[in-house]
Image: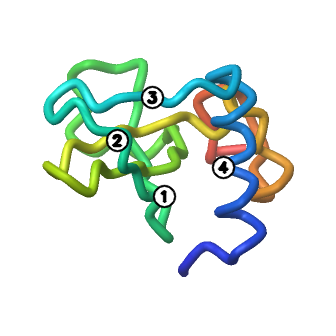
Amino acid sequence: MALNENQQLAIINALTVKSRGNLVHCPISGDSNWQVQNQLAHIPATDDPTASVLRDRVFPCAVLVCQTCGYTVLLNLFVLGLADEFGLTGELAGNVSE
């Protein structure tokens, strides 16, 4: 499901606050030409390093891509303070087994 305009703006606003309004430059290209993608990324997480299927938790992340070189940054929605905006519940890692 694609992010709606309000969700994309919430990500941009949260990043503006977290960066104190400073432009963030890409570590590869040096540019500050970022785009918020209209999908989220979910990074699987587990407490069991031997698990073959990681389903107990995920890190829900906003995805930013440098439009010059493609460098991609994932930002945890809980840390950005956007859990409510995205209807997320659980711990910082986004416990999905509740």
- Which secondary structure lies at badge 3? loop
The amino acid beneath tag 1 is: Val
Mark toward the start of the polypeptide (2 vs 3): 3
Q: Residue at x 64, y 36 (%)?
A: 15
Number of the front mark, 2 or 3: 3
Q: Which residue is drawn at 26% across and 19% down?
A: 49
Q: Within the image, what quadrant is residue 91 found in?
A: top right
Rate crowding at label 4 as few (under 14), some (14 to 19) or many (20 or more) other CA atoms within 10 Å: many
Mark toward the start of the polypeptide (4 vs 1): 4
Question: Which residue lies most toward the right here?
Answer: 84
Instruction: Tell me residue 61's x, y (percent).
Output: 51, 44
Q: Residue 24, labelled with which disc?
A: 3
- Closer to us: 64 or 61: 64
The amino acid beneath tag 2 is: Leu
Q: In this view, does 30 lie above or below 4?
A: above
- Which secondary structure lies at badge 1? strand
Q: Residue 11, labelled with which disc?
A: 4
Q: Residue 36, labelled with which disc?
A: 1
The amino acid beneath tag 3 is: Val
Instruction: Tell me residue 46's x, y (percent).
Output: 40, 27
Q: CB under 8 Å between callouts 4 and 1? A: yes
